[in-house]
Every structure is written in C-alpha cells, then in structure tokens.
Image (cartoon, rainbow, N blue to C red):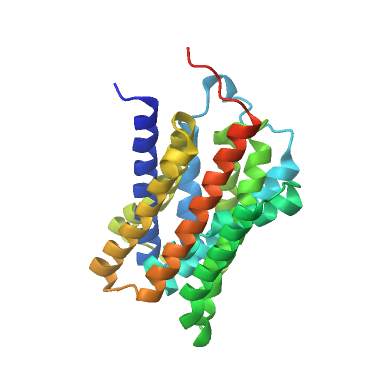
Amino acid sequence: MLSKNQLGFLYMFMSICAFSLMDIIVKWSVDYPIGQVLFFRGFFGIIFYFFIIPKERLHNFYQTKRPGLHLLRCTSGLIALVSIFIALRELPLATVVSISFAAPIFTTIFSIFLLSEKVGIFRWLAVIIGFIGILIITEPGLSELNIYYIFPIIFCLGLSYVAITIRQLSSTEPVWLISFYFSLSIMILSFFTIPHGWVMPSFNHLILLSFVGIFGGVANLWLSQSYKYSEVSLVTPLKYLALVFAIIFGYLIWDEIPTIKTLFGAFLVIISTLIIFRREIYKKKVITPEPLND
C-alpha cells in the first residue's frame, strides 16, 4: 500500500502527464477551429464528470446556492482556456508552459485586492522575480511585435482569478460540481462558433480530439486528489516536469528548441512561484497549529 504522500505524488504526476498530452493535442489541432476543439474539451469533460457524481445527487446534481460565483469562475476560466489554446497554436510549447507557471504570481496580487490578504516582503520579492522572468521570456516576441505572447499572460490572469473563485466556492460546493459547470460553459461557448465553420474530422482525428476533454477532465480530478492526499509544498515542485515534457515533445514533434532566454526566464518564474508556495505553507503552519498524529 502507498502512503498518503506517495499517493499525492502519483496523482500529481498523472495530472501533469494528462495536461501535457492535452496541450500536445491542442497544438496539433491547428486544422480545426478553436471553437470546435473547445466543444470536445467541454462535451467529453461533462461525460467524464457524470461518472463521479454521487448517486444521491444524480437527481439534483446541478443545484447550487452560488450561481453568481459559478458564473464568474466560468467566465474567467473560459478567458484563460481560449487564451492558452491560441498560445499553444502560435508559440513554441516550452515558451507557453514557461509563462503559464506565472499564474501563482498573479494570484498573489489578486488576493490582496479581492481577499484582503496581507502580502509580506518575501512574496513581493517573488512577484518581482517572476515578472522579470516573464519579461525575459517575452522580450523577443514583444520586440518583434508578436501579439501572441500576450495570450499566455492573459491565461495566467484568468487562471489566477479562477483560483480565487474556486477558493471561495470550495467552502460550500463539491469539486465535481465546480468542474461540471465549467465544462458545460465551454460547450455552450463552442456552439456560438459553429457559423464560423467547423470541419468534419476523420475517425482517427475524432478520437484524438475527444481526448482533449478526457485528458482535461481526469487531469483536474487527479490534481484535486493530489492536494487531498499530500501537502501542497511536497507535490507542487512536480508541476515543473511539464516544462521538461514541453521541451521534449516540442523538439520531437515540431523541432522546437527553447532559447537560453526562455530557459533562464522560466527558471526565474519557477523560483518565484516556489517562494510563494513555501510562504503560503509557512503562513498556514504559523496561523493553524499542526494537529497531533494519532
């Protein structure tokens, strides 16, 4: 039998693999409109969550007392998802993944204004280091007026607000319901893109596109399970395996080689997010004493 920490590591590793595979399929799907890919992400995500809804909630699984907050979570999540889909198609895989690591930096800033949290000097230092890393990564794109470099940053902004709303929703709402409404909103948004022309996929492509939703669904579930079984500080560093996967797959599939600037900027962003996570854990340990082990 695996220990709780080992289970947490396993779930985090599987989550990273699933997210990485989803990113690869999204980047591959350039021959299909983004709206059509969104449909597969939403539709197959919904199907997946029906398998984990508790039996006693099947008759009223959709009920919620916080529809407004769900709407905010879905809106910010859609902005983030569309942005990362565009970025994955137009930029090197490693570059997109590197910038996406900056989401906790923006979450820290949002928490000051939206949750009235106090941020100390260490987390402010982490924010500054992270922004320097982002500037180093995007400088070539901005200097060449490549507008697509803005989309991973929009993704980080959207994802940061998602983290804030999920933190508020999770006090009363089950994880599967939060995820269900998000997948439903993705599918609804995709229907508005039908007039712009969808492409009939071949059977093989249909299978691949369906995995966008399946991988996205299981990745979110495994991520939640990882945090359930293990401390965030222990499993979070595993997230940066995504950059290793991005470099490997980017090179093998698209002949992409990350620049020294991208790698150095990614290093600074990773350092900044690790500082933020460590300070969050330290803060919780100071405020809330550790329970005694039985």
Instruction: Report which quarter residue 88 is drawn in.
Output: bottom left
Taking the spot 66% from the left edge, 51% from the top edge, the residue there is 120
Q: Is residue 60 above or below residue 96?
A: above
Seen from the viewer's position, the closer of residues 200 and 31 is 31
Residue 189 visible? The answer is: no
Q: In screen coordinates, is 94 left or right of 133?
A: left
Q: In screen coordinates, is 212 left or right of 196?
A: left
Instruction: Report which quarter residue 56 is drawn in.
Output: top right
Q: Is residue 146 above or below residue 178?
A: below
- Whole-percent x, y for residue 114 in the image: 74, 50
- Whole-percent x, y for residue 115 in the image: 73, 46
Residue 164 visible? The answer is: yes
Query: In the displayed image of the protein, which residue is found farthest to the left?
Result: 252
Seen from the viewer's position, the closer of residues 160 and 65 is 160
Query: In the displayed image of the protein, which residue is found farthest to the top?
Result: 294
Taking the spot 48% from the left edge, 31% from the top edge, the residue there is 228
Q: In screen coordinates, is 55 left or right of 59?
A: left
